[in-house]
Image (cartoon, rainbow, N blue to C red):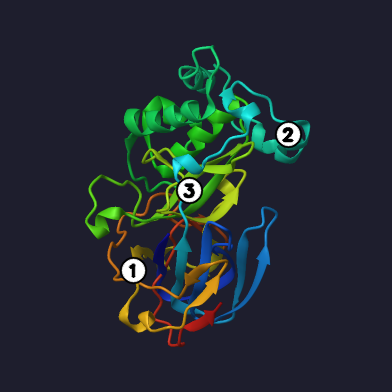
Amino acid sequence: MKRFTVRHTTRYNYAQPAAFGPHRLMMRPRDSHDLRLVHAELTLSPPGATRWMHDVFGNSVALVEFNQSATELLIESTLHLVSYGLPRLAVSIAPEAQNYPFVYSASDRSDLGRLVERHYPDPLGLVDAWAKRFFPGDPMPTYDLLAKLNSAIKEEFAYNARYEEGTQSPIETLEKRSGTCRDFALLYIEAVRSLGFGARFITGYLYDPALDGAQGGIQGAGATHAWADVYLPGAGWVEYDPTNGLIAGDNLIRIAVTRDPSQAVPISGTFTAKPSDFLGMTVEVTVTSGIPDDEAAAPQTPSQGEAQAPVQTQVQGVNSHPDVEELPKASADTGAIQEQIEIQNDAQNSNAPAEPEKQLA
């Protein structure tokens, strides 16, 4: 069990007051047996009317309507979480699926639906060929096959931050031999789908154990992170992080799961301003562990035999190099223009006179 605090701050800056359209935020996880949300706070400046919903995948989504113009838009999410990691020995695959190849039951296949299907064209079979490198033809342990694919991406591909919007296709990632965490997660998902597995995309955060003095290089900390989920009968959904070669690690903090990366944008919305008025944005993501002094004395509420309390941590790790989908895209109109904000770690600084609005969960 580990306790984490996640702070995700996004600021957008403008030379003149901009009007903000509706925004959609995916910044809050759902409670589960392996991840407990102890406390959540959403800060907005200028203030906005917020309502919550669950999307088609069951993710928690905030829909925000702003009614003030400002020269800065601030969106800040603070989460206090308890994570229960899943060690390898706890991945108990059903007997009929312990060795690959296997076939999902008719019920599982029906429920998995499009999560088993390939989503990206592969006319020359490049993704197929790459995935089949790890399956020589004779039956092999399912866990080993998936672990080899996961490790191969970490070992064979270079991690490079990218400012362009969107996610590379799996073929692009294979050809470039480099990418971001989102690119690697998508390649892994399409590779295992080509082998018949059901898989989905996860967006969230990554804790770097180096903050506690541990050794080893973690890629993707200090920003939003992405990885993959694979469905294994008996074990259920098991997380694979090909960027770091991690499997079901308790430093992976899941926020949302989707069928495709395009559906997992932490902040999306619009603003109206002249193109020259947009001055840029800054993003800061910190993930830390521990209990700060002001939370240590808080009463603890046992749940299912576990004592759990609000947690916080010493904060460090500024993300000055957002990973992907960090830049607003413009759709020009006459005079003022409406900018699409589809960003993974968004934030814009406004000189808004309004006090930030805090919403407690």
Which amino acid is tagged 1?
Answer: Gly
Question: Residue 84: x and y, percent?
Answer: 47, 57
Q: Is residue 336 visible?
A: no
Q: Is residue 250 visible?
A: yes
Element type at mark 3? loop
What residue do we see at 63% from left, 39% from top?
234
Q: Is residue 53 above or below residue 141?
A: below
Q: Is residue 212 left or right of residue 105?
A: left
Spatial CA span between label 2 and label 3? 25 Å
Asked if the residue under mark 3 is in contact with the one under mark 2, i.e. CB atoms within 8 Å, the reply is no
Question: Residue 251: x and y, percent?
Answer: 40, 53
Residue that badge 3 annotates: 86
Which amino acid is tagged 2?
Answer: Arg
Residue that badge 1 annotates: 290
Q: Of the residues under marks 2 and 1, which one precedes in the sequence? A: 2
What residue do we see at 53% from left, 56% from top?
34
Query: Label 1: how many residues lie within 10 Å, few (<14), some (14-19) or many (20+)?
Result: some
Spatial CA span between label 2 and label 1? 41 Å
Query: Can you name the residue that lies furthest to the front here?
Result: 305
